[in-house]
Image: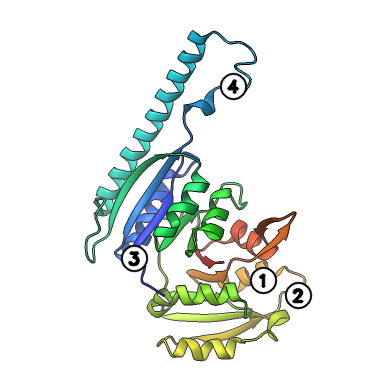
Amino acid sequence: MIFPQSILMPLSTSGNEQERILGALAVTEFFAAHLEVLHAQVGPQRFIPDDAIARRMPNKLLHELEALAEKYSSTEANELQKLFVSLCEQRGVSCSDASLANTPTAYWREVTGLRSELIGERGKVNDLVVIPQSTSGKATATLEAAVMRSGKPVLLMPRIQTHFSADRAIIAWNGSTEGARAVTHALPLLQHAKEVVIATSLSSAYRKPGADELLIYLQRHDIKAVSKNFDSGRKSAGEALLGLATELKSELLVMGAYTHRRVHEQIFGGMTQYMVAHAKIPIFMMH
């Protein structure tokens, strides 16, 4: 349970770059923290056809392709960094690798390697990982690495959201270990909130500890909350929960990131997948 001071966000040219940067800066300003924007590239070889050697392409042509690819990668990175610096100046956030007390700062880090592996690794030495929703609505390898390997909470941001507020928070509670971890790590946010609602599905209300016990736990941290049960009926639990969040005008959802095993590979379970695809508000999640 700490107030985040070091935040990590990956960035790529997959659309909505300006909105994604502004969203991360808004989170950084909220915590008066330090943000590291990680731009990872796997190298220009990714632009070269896999079967180039098999086709026996002339060395001169291969070198020309590599040069073009490297030029493209460099241009892409430079344009993104210029946008990042411009938006930092626009928001009054200092561009610095060093943290400043009670002052939001941000730093651009250019690295080579697979983005998912780097986020899983560098997330371990940050307090919070901000991941934008994917364009497909599916959980990406980067999100899975952040949740499963970083050991830190993840804030999944709606892709085009450029502001951040946690005045009205909703907790998805079913007594799980993952949910408990998420609540504990979210305590600084919940203490800031003006309204906190514990939402429990009627189908899981019997699980212990229940919402009444969570209420007592939160009270010990000076957090006043109320509990609400929801009935999913013919809807999925995720759809019903999001419906309740919309009804309550919630600005933040706190929940555990649930997984199941398939062929020895850990992947997100149905509830988490639904929330990742359809949530219109930031999700603070922890595995």
Q: Residue at x 33, y 45 (%)?
A: 108
Q: Which residue is mark 3?
A: 30
Q: Which residue is mark 4?
A: 49
Circles 3 and 4, Cβ within 8 Å, touching? The answer is no
Q: Amino acid at mark 2?
A: Gly
Please say if 178 is above or below 55. below
Q: Amino acid at mark 4?
A: Pro
Q: Which residue is mark 1?
A: 240
Task: State the CA–CA distance, disc 2 to disc 3.
Answer: 37 Å
- The tag earlier along the polypeptide, 1 or 4, is 4
Q: Is residue 215 visible?
A: yes
Residue 257 percent across, percent down from the top left: 59, 66
Residue 5 percent across, percent down from the top left: 33, 64
Q: Is residue 23 visible?
A: no
Please say if 166 is above or below 90. below
- The tag earlier along the polypeptide, 3 or 4, is 3
Q: Which mark is residue 233?
A: 2
Circles 4 and 2, Cβ within 8 Å, touching? The answer is no
Considering the numbered disc 2 on the image, is that residue within a helix, a strand or a loop? Answer: loop
Please say if 68 is above or below 204. above
Circles 2 and 1, Cβ within 8 Å, touching? The answer is yes
- The tag earlier along the polypeptide, 4 or 2, is 4
Task: State the CA–CA distance, disc 3 to disc 4.
Answer: 45 Å
